[in-house]
Every structure is written in C-alpha cells, then in structure tokens.
Image (cartoon, rainbow, N blue to C red):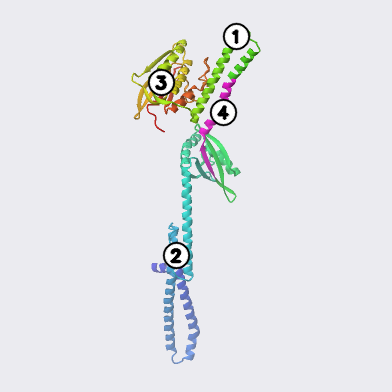
Amino acid sequence: MKLWNYLSRLLWHSVVGKLWATIMLLVAVVLLILGVFLLQYIDIWFVENSHDIKVLFVITAIIGFLLSTFFAFFLSTKLQQPLLQLKNAADSISQGNYTTRVDIRSSDEIGQLANMFNHMTEQLDKLIHDLNHEKKHLASILRSMGDSVITFDAKGQIILTNPSADLLINNWSDLEIARQEQSLVADSTYLGVPMPLRDLFQNVMSEGRDMTDTVHVHSFVWSVVMAPLHTNQEVQGAVAVIRNVTEEHKLDKLRRDFVANISHEIRTPLSMLQGYSEALLDEIVVDPEDRRELVQVIHDESLRMGRLVNGFLDIARVEAGHIETNMQEIDLHYLIARVHRKFLVLSKEHEVHMHVEAAEYPLILKQADEDKLEQVLTNLLDNALRHTPSGKAITIKADQQCLNGSYYIQLIVEDEGQGIPQEDLPYVFERFYKADKARKRGASGGTGLGLAIVKSFIDLHQGEITVKSAKGRGTTFTMLLPVEPKTK
C-alpha cells in the first residue's frame, strides 16, 4: 500500500510521471482501438488460423506496449535531468546562493531555458551585489554622521537608526517612563516615537510635508528636521534628522547678552560724560570745587571706558589668536612679591589683611608671559578687594604640584568675602558677570571683563583655573600652570 501511494505521488506530482502516463495511455488507447476494430474481422478473414493470429496480435501488442514504455521512459529521463537541475538551482538561489548556474548544453527549448536561467541569475547576482554595496555605503554614511537619523514607519515604529540615534533614544527613554508614571492612562498613539518627537511626527504624518522644530531635553537643545516618506502618493512613514545645537544656542544667547551688556556698559559712562560736560559748557556750575568734582567724574568715567575698551581688545586678540606674547623663563616669587606690594597700600585703606604663602624653593615656569600673569593676579586681587569687607583677609598661595607625571605651579587667590552662590559658579568666567545678582558694581566701577580675561590668559598658558565658593563664605580661585607647556 505504501509503495502504491509512493508511486501514485511520483506519477501525479512529477512532470516526467505525467508525461510517461500520457504516452502509455495513448499507446493503450491505440492498441484498444486496433483490437476492437481488427479482432472481429480476424474470424471472418482467417477462419483456419484465427486463433494463432489473435495470439500473434496480442503478443505484438504486448511487445509494442513494452517498447513504447521503454522509449517513453528514456524520453522522460532525458527531460527529467535538466528539469531537476533547474529545480535544484532554483532551490539554491532561494537560499541566497546567487552564484548558482546550471550546466545544460543543448540547442532545444530546455537549453534555451537554461541559458535564460543562467542570465537571470547573473543579473540577479549583480543586482544583489549592487544593493548590498549601496546598503553598506549608506550604513557607513549613517555611522559616520554626527547627527542622529531615525526612520519611522506609518505606525511610528522605528525601522532604521544610526549609532548616534541609538544613544539619543536611550537617553530619552526615561522621559517616557516618567510620563507613564505620572499619567494613569498612557497615550497609546505612536508609542514607538520618542516623546520629544511625537507631536512633530503627528503633524508630518497628517500634513505630509517637511517640518522643523527645536526641542529642549535635559538642558540640551536639539534641532529636528523631519520629512515624510511617500509611496504611491501615500505617507508610509517619516525620517528625522536630529542635531545637538546646545552650543550654538548658548553662543547665540551669549551674543545677544553681550550686545545688551555692552550697550548698557557704554551708555552709562557716555550719559555721564555728556551730562557733566554740558553742565561745564553751559557754566551751570560756577563753584571751582564743584567744577573740579565734575571734571574728576568725567575723568573717572573716561578711564572706565578705556578699561572697558582695552578689555574688549584683549579678549578679541586672544580669541583671534593675534595677541602678542613674550614667553620666557620666570620665577613666580618675584611676580607675587611685586603684585603684593602693589596692592598692599590699597588693602590697608580697605582694612583688609593680605598674606602671601609661597614655597621657599624656586617656582620656575619655563615658558610664561610675565605681564599676562601679572594681569591675571591683578584682576583676581582687584575682585577680591572689592568684595571682601573690612577686617577680613586675602591670601595668595603658591606651590609646586605633580599630577599624572607632569609638574605644575599651583596659584591660589583666596578671600573671605561675600562669596558666590552655587548656581552662579558656572558663569563666573563669562563676560559682564558682574551684572549678575552675585556681583554688583562697587565704588571701583569694574568692567565685568576681568574674569573673562583671566580665563583667556590662563588658557593661553595651557593652564586651568577653577573656582570654589559659597555665599557668605568667601571665594577661592585655583590656577594650575604647567612648568613646561606642551608643544603644539
């Protein structure tokens, strides 16, 4: 029974089996037709030998049937071999082996079919190779991009990202968790889209056009450009390019603040110069003492404007890399002593104690600009004096430190003044910081550029400067200057 089932499946599920069965059926039909029409005339025509003729006819029919079966089997085998080769080659190609070829050399239709099959596989192999090359090329471009690229399908599921986008999605994942914890029923629309991009994605999918937006996440600013993906005039998804523009945003804000601050800083002395000079020209003030006081105010304001302009020039030269330096070997002992003497009289007038705690051994810097470092200490001590009340102290410390195998000179300017709030510490080296709530203009009329210049000059020496402070507990500026700067 099993053998019969196998033969029946082989017969009806094979082209060769069907061809063989068809030939056999045709032979049987021919023989039956001949038998039906001829056997009835044998008894009439051959009365004496009718039986022998019938036997001969049956034997001839059997022999003819066997010969037809043999030739049908031979023909079907010749057809089966190339068909099996084509079938096996097709199976190999379906498994990804696009270099498969069939070796059939004949000029009939099967040979032509084999040639067309080989040509098709060659073209398919070339097409797959080109597609893989383009895919690798695109993947390399995406990996090398600093911007984050995310592709969404129509349901908002992510289908393609680059490494930068993977990091960004991981950083934004806590936003969705926090939102779900705050909301009892989470919005199930486009859950695959990161929450900061969800509104923009909905707008792009509904309107079907390019859109841009700026999102603020975790104190960072991101610029998003999202474009729809069209297929047959239908929106099938969207691709988003996300760029971190935090620095550009800060610089733009700094530029606006700089213009506003410089306008404010220059407007005040100009107004005073104009008003007092007009009072002198109109001879409104006739008393010599009052006139001398007005002239002194004009002189002080002109000096302050001069310091303001010089500060702008110093910062501009440093940022442009055009500042002139005189690098040479110096001993900080002499520089500290000179700056200490310069401020000693002023500190006594303010009733502020000024101390110097420097190492006894030489504090040598191989390459340093003495004038620039003197301006650094001058600016720091000037700030310390203006913000340290009477009876308190200012200390200058100097020592040598070894960090990571490199030697540095550590300079510390420490005061017992009013201090700086913690939230304002990151901004102390910005221009016009004195305009903030922690630094109000005193009688000395600072320009607000001192710490910005200090930071620029320390960077010029390949050093570092840090600040520690707390409101009401004083301020400490710590500078690390390399003994031997690295060659650029």
Instruction: State the CA–CA distance, disc 3 to disc 2.
Output: 86 Å
Earlier residue among tags 4 and 3: 4
x, y percent for residue 235: 57, 47
Horizontal and vertical percent for residue 165?
48, 41
Q: What span is colored magenta in the figure?
A: 238-267
- Residue 344, image x, y percentages: 43, 13
Q: Residue 469 lies in what quarter of the image? A: top left
Give yes or no for contact between labels 1 and 4 (Cβ–Cβ under 8 Å).
Answer: no
User: Is residue 166 depicted above or below 481 in this figure?
Assistant: below
Which numbered disc, 1 or 3, marks the residue that appears first in the sequence?
Answer: 1
Nearer the viewer's eye, disc 1 or disc 2? 1
Sooner in the amino-acid sequence: mark 4 or mark 2: 2
Instruction: Tell me which residue sits at (44%, 64%) in the image.
Output: 87
Mark 1 → mark 2, Cα distance in angstroms: 113 Å
From where the camera sits, is residue 423 visible?
A: no
Q: What whole-number distance in Å separates the C-alpha atoms at marks 4 and 3?
A: 33 Å
Left or right: 97 as drawn, with respect to 448:
left
Name the mark on residue 86: 2
Q: Position of residue 40 (x, y in %)?
A: 49, 86
Which amino acid type is shown beneath numbered disc 2? Leu
Residue at which label 3 appears = 412
Which residue is rendered at x = 56% and y = 12% of the image? 296
